[in-house]
Amino acid sequence: MSVIQNVESIKYRFLSKEPYSTNDISFVYINSNGEYRLVENGAHLTNAELRAQKYNVRYSILRKKQTFTDQVKLASDNMIDEFEVTLRFTVKVIEPIEYIKNDMDEQLESNVKDRVFGDLRRMANQYAIEEYVQLESTMKGNLQVLDELEDEGLKVDIIPQVEVSQEIKQKLKSKRDAIDDKRLSYTLEDMDKDRERQLREKEFAEFTEIFAGTPLERYTTMFKNVDQLREHLLSEYKDKRNVMEKLKTQYMDGQIDATQLKKAQDLFQGFDSMIGGVDSSQLESGEKKLYIERSDSDKDQSSKEETENSFSKGYKKMATAEMTDKGWE
């Protein structure tokens, strides 16, 4: 395929006339100074212009559309499965002077195909083999190489058709059938598990929001779910409670004084509401009976409520208490 129909050496003759251009044929004249002159749409170069500008070469350019078709296989994203692409090309010279300057006419068809296929090859590498319909749709959009060719004087349009082999189609069908079977096997039990998972995720998100900006915030990044977080905090709470109970016993036995107990109480402030501790004024007045005047049943009931009920309801209060990081280590 060629767009340049003829290249002739010419010179001025007194009785000669230059040919008239048509809708399908244009003429490009060039002189020794590298100056170009386009003649098109029924016009012709006069003898006066030919003599004055000293044009010595005349190109005859075909301006009507030309078409050709080609096929190519393009690798998908896994670089194994291939798309089977059929392309119908339509080419037309829109800027004859630029076309001649870019010396595109020699092996025009193969040059156009190579450049377009290069762009399409890079595009196909971004698509999975099952996305061949989407790939065809994308190919119908504007390719960068088509803009580049237009800048060089050649308008190129493509009509792509993308297919895959029957073997690949059968594999894709089997894959879709397997997915459909999995969807059909989705049971009420699966729905309950999903619902429970969603609730736990929501609860964990609520804990994260409550603990934001408090010493407890670091725990929300240490655990994956709310159960692990709850178990760890409950364990710490019990450990702190045991330490406080031991210090109270030592205080009652006279092993430590009120000042030492007060320091411990200050260290564990924030747990006061959950462990039934005393404040500074009670420590200073020596009201030790607050630790011993509960009956065993009261203690058991209080412990149960504090560790199971009150603890589960008291996260926000605990989190917003004025605790130091030292108190949690």
Image (cartoon, helix red, strand yellow):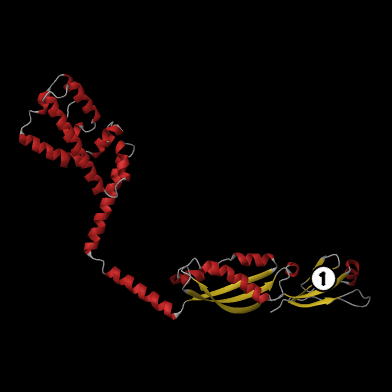
Q: In x, y percent, where is residue 9?
A: 85, 76
Residue at image position (11%, 36%) is 302
- The image quadrant that residue 60 belongs to is bottom right
Which quadrant is the C terminus positioned in?
Answer: top left
* Residue position marked by numbered label 1 in the rendering: 29
Would you say 212 lies left or right of 258 here?
right
Secondary structure found at label 1: strand
| Residue 29 in the image: above or below residue 232 | below
Work out which residue is located at the far front of the displayed protein and give it: 255
The crowding category of the residue bearing disc 1, from other C-alpha atoms within 10 Å (few below 14, some 14 to 19, many at least 20), is: many
Identify whether 296 is placed above or below 164: above
* Residue at horizontal 33 percent and vertical 45 percent from the top: 221
**In the figure, is residue 62 to the left or right of 179?**
right
Q: Is residue 44 visible?
A: no
The location of residue 267, given as percent across then percent down, is 24, 29
Residue 153, quarter of the rendered image = bottom right
Q: In the rendered view, does 324 fall on the left or right side of 87?
A: left
The residue sitting at the right extreme is 14
Front-most of residues 239 and 161? 239
Image spot of residue 1 (x, y percent): 68, 79
Q: Residue furthest bottom?
A: 166
Residue found farthest to the top: 285
> Which residue is pictured at 70% across the width and 69% down the height?
94
Image quadrant assignment for residue 247: top left
Instruction: Give amino acid for label 1.
Output: Tyr
